[in-house]
Structure formats: structure tokens, C-alpha cells
Image: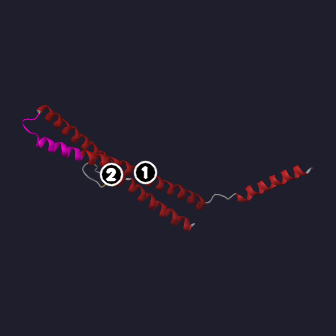
Amino acid sequence: MNLIEILLLVIAITELARLVLSYKKPTKKIFFQNELYFLVKRIWNKEFEIFQKRGIREGIRKEHEYLSARLDKIKTDIENWSKDADQGEKARREDDKVRTEADIKKLQDQMRGFDLEIEGCKPCVEYPEGLMGLTGEIEGLKEVQYSIEDWIKQL
């Protein structure tokens, strides 16, 4: 045997010994530690979803404010319209008012939807069983997390 073959044999034996020595028989403790690891990742994912939805909601809120200010301007224009001025233009302004009110209603519904997704709601007429939002899901996952941590301590 030459030197290269001896070195390759030593490397192979070393790798086999490393694999055998590093192998751990699966236990309950290892299983639940892995479950805890993935549970924490799910909590992080839900927190990120909340962050994203709040950002989108904030954009909708800003647009809502802009349209509300625009609606106030249109209403004051219509109220202050002189009788001698062009009535066709006044009719267009009233049409703008109706469209802006409809847009504001849509934005309010969208914001309400995001609020329900994030916070959920208690039982009410619209949702007799209530809704669990992302914050409720996170609270539930954290309770499971604490239970698993206590279980691991007992093992």
C-alpha cells in the first residue's frame, strides 16, 4: 500500500467514526424540540403577515383621508354654487360627489376587512361565532409553545 491509499483509508475510517458517534437515537425530547422550533417559525410568519397587512391598511387609510378631504371640498363647492353659474358643471360635481362617496365606502370596507383579519371579532350579528384574527392565532400558538416547553422540561 502506498501513502495515498493509507491516507484515503484513514479518511474513510474517520468519516465512518464521525457518522457513528454523531448519530443520536430519536427521542421524545428531540422530537418535541423540533416541534417547538417549527412552532416558533410559524409564530414569526404570522407576525410578519400582521406587519404586511398593517402596511397595506395604512395605504388604504391615507387614500381614504385624501378622498374624504376631496368629498368635503366637493360638498362645499356644491353648497356655494351660485344660481347664475353653469348648472351642467354643478351636475358633474354632484356626480363626482356620488362616485367619491362610493369610493370611500369601498375603502372603509377594505379597512374593516383588514381589521378583521388582524384582530378578529367577538360573536356578533354578522359573525355569530366570531372570528379569530392573526393576533388570536399567535396567542394560541404561544400557549402551545409554553405547553411544549413545559413538556420538554419534564422529559
**Frontmost residue, 154 versus 103:** 103
Q: What stretch is highlighted in magenta?
A: 68-85
Q: Which mark is residue 49?
A: 1
| Label 2 crowd bin: few (<14), some (14–19), many (20+), radius 10 Å | some
Q: What element carries label 1?
A: helix
Q: Dot 2: what SS? A: helix
Q: Which residue is drawn at 15% across and 45% down?
A: 76
Q: Which residue is drawn at 45% across and 58% down?
A: 141
Q: Which residue is depicted at the point 51% across and 62% down? A: 148
Residue beneath disc 2: 115
Left or right of 96? Residue 113 is: right
Q: What is the CA distance from the residue labelled 1 to the residue labelled 2? A: 13 Å
Where residue 135 appears, x then y in whole percent?
39, 56
Rendering colour mode = secondary structure
Q: Nearer the viewer, residue 50 or 61?
A: 61
Q: In the image, 104: left or right of 144?
A: left
Magenta stretch: includes residue 17: no
Residues at circles 1 and 2 in contact by the CB criterion of under 8 Å: no
Q: Where is residue 8 in the image (x, y as percent from the top left)?
A: 84, 50
Residue 96, located in which quarter of the rendered image? top left
The local crowd at label 1, few if under 14, some if 14 to 19, many if 20 or more residues have their Cα within 10 Å, is some
